Image (cartoon, rainbow, N blue to C red):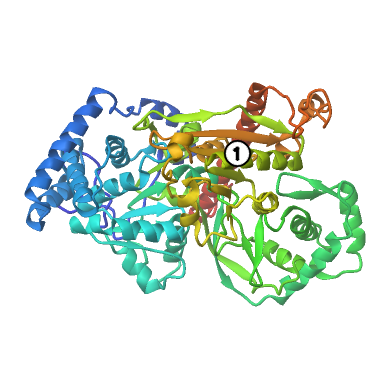
Amino acid sequence: MTRGMRLRGAPPLPVPGLVHGSYPLAGLRPGNVPAPLQWMAAPLRRLQAAWPLHGAPARRLLQAVEAAQAGWQAQGLHGHLLRPLQARLAREGWHPDLRASALGCAAAAARQAMGLQPFGTQLLAAHALLDDRLVQLPTGEGKTLAAALAAAVAALAGVPVHVMTANDYLAARDARRLAPMFEALGLRVACVVAGLPPEQRRDAYAADITYCTAREAAFDALRDTRRGEAPPLLRGQCMALLDEADSLLVDDATMPLVLSAPQHDPQQRAACFQALALARQLQPGLHWQLDAQPAVACTPLGEAELERLCSGLAGAWLNRRHRLDLVASALQALHLLQPGRDYLVREGRVQLLDAVTGRVADGRSWSRGLHTLVELKEGLAPSPAQHTVAQTSFQRFFGRYLRLAGLSGTLAECRAELQQVYGRQVVVLAPRRATRRLQLPSRLYPDAASRQAAIVRRVAALHAQGRPVLVGTDGLDASQALSAALAAAGLPHRRLDARHDADEAAVVAAAGQRGAITVATRMAGRGTDILLGEGVAELGGLHVIDAQDNPSARLDRQLAGRCARQGDPGSAEAWRRADAEAWRAGWLTHWRSGWRPGGRNVQAEGSEARMPPACIDAWTAWRQRTHEQHAATRRQRLLEEERSWDMQLKHPGARR
């Protein structure tokens, strides 16, 4: 039987060969249905079988895996014994009858090479990943090993696997740590990080299992479309396993991935200089206003004023569309994009910050002259102009994988979108041990200063008890201000943000030690467990203060999930501030208008508004749900536009 074929009439394995070609790519997905057939998509999704492994079926699978693991441990993981299993997997695929033996083999390798015994939840998660599903596994339950087990089974079948993690550090760390397990199975593992030369990249993708970031893999796939006669870097998009899947599939879905090449364009640089000069002469509210964050639009008065200012200019400045677009970008650079929140100025360069994680987004830049405008605003020498040679988005990139699965601690909230766009069901697994997290009532403060003062008092009280504290802040400015306030109060602490990400893992890992105080921006996807120090559990475990005004409930849950892992004790509370952008809305503005320091609805100490916690939570949930719906609409609109562009490229006469 030809490699890539399967018995029992099931789909062929996603491997390079006669079936899928030398560079496998996916065709249409349930979420990528042509417009004439979209009416069939919803009924077909509802008819998809639910994940069957609950209760007794799950127990039977775990028993079969345990028996298989015992057998492999007894006879040893020798090559002559592994080859028949690999041959069967390549021939038949990892159907349920064979999967228990393969998972038992992978579990035996983890036990033999690393001393790790996979838990039942990890084995069930690996099983679901091999079923091409997305798995919600609570934080601290071992997503890294669960993904490794699934990757091992797929690689034993001959499928090239890409395991995508949050950053280069985690990709290199996981590949290094898990190498003994994969080597025990006769598999080769490699990693791809930023700055790796093309030949080394090609060799890394040739491994059985490749750890990388989604960004590196996406750009390498883009480069493969532009390489001409040169050998491709990837072996196709066969199978991807995503860590923090919701961050990649939802939060970063609309991020444009633009492959650029430098070009000499002095006219663009001169135009950016002129646009900044013009933008500085326009008044907010009168000449321009917010359109859709983070964009601005000129008012009719602004358009008239801009036409007057450009009357003495020549060339493209006489074109209304050109001057409006470029000046709007200049206004965005001047007034909306802020250092410390949206970007850093480091080593004479502008480095973008990821809005979700707070990390520096290496290699990322704004398009359409915006990056040059920010550089000029900061008084830096503009970097060479770039022109786009290829472009995609994570929605399109992940849609090209023949097999796509992933894990996260927060997937349930966006399961409908994941099903619609990617055709993937979400499996929610319960924690191995019941959670002992104590969720304290939410609080509301009038402004950032009063909340910060209250945080310092709260941290001081917990520190005196010896409990470790983790405070999550919105951005670099907030973390710096809180750090200064803690230092003034004589409280030793460590800060983790975009300026201090080199020792990220060490800072996060030490956050559970007795008396530790950690201030962090955007804890999503840190990828390192916070282990409790000696005697900390008896004190109540790690305490998390959520001082973030997150647009998504998932981000709040990710931060709270840093405490009370694997049955440990812990507590969390969310502290909001009334002057945050999220609270500036209609009737709520009038409702909280009387909450001023000294007012009857405000506590004397810390000026904390006595708004009932249930009301705070209800409002937060409402505005987060509204934001998520708007974001989902934008993602769907972008996906439809991309499909339209694809159709035009394939059929030049087609209409948008």
Left-right relation of 565 to 95: right
Left-right relation of 102 to 513: left
Instruction: Give the farthest residue toward the front.
Output: 464
Left-right relation of 55 to 282: left
Residue 457: x, y in percent? 67, 40
The residue drawn where x is 56% and y is 37% is: 556
Is 284 above or below relative to 464?
A: below
Is 26 above or below relative to 36?
A: below
Is 513 above or below relative to 578?
A: below
The residue drawn where x is 26% and y is 42% is: 118
Q: Which residue is mark 1?
A: 546
Residue 589: x, y in percent? 79, 29
The residue drawn where x is 64% and y is 24% is: 618
Residue 600: x, y in percent? 82, 23
The amino acid type, in three-letter code, at marker 1 is: Asp
Q: Can you see residue 29?
A: yes
Asked whether 619 or 435 is in front, the reply is: 435
The residue drawn where x is 35% and y is 31% is: 433
Asked whether 438 or 398 is in front, the reply is: 438
Asked whether 509 or 73 is in front, the reply is: 509
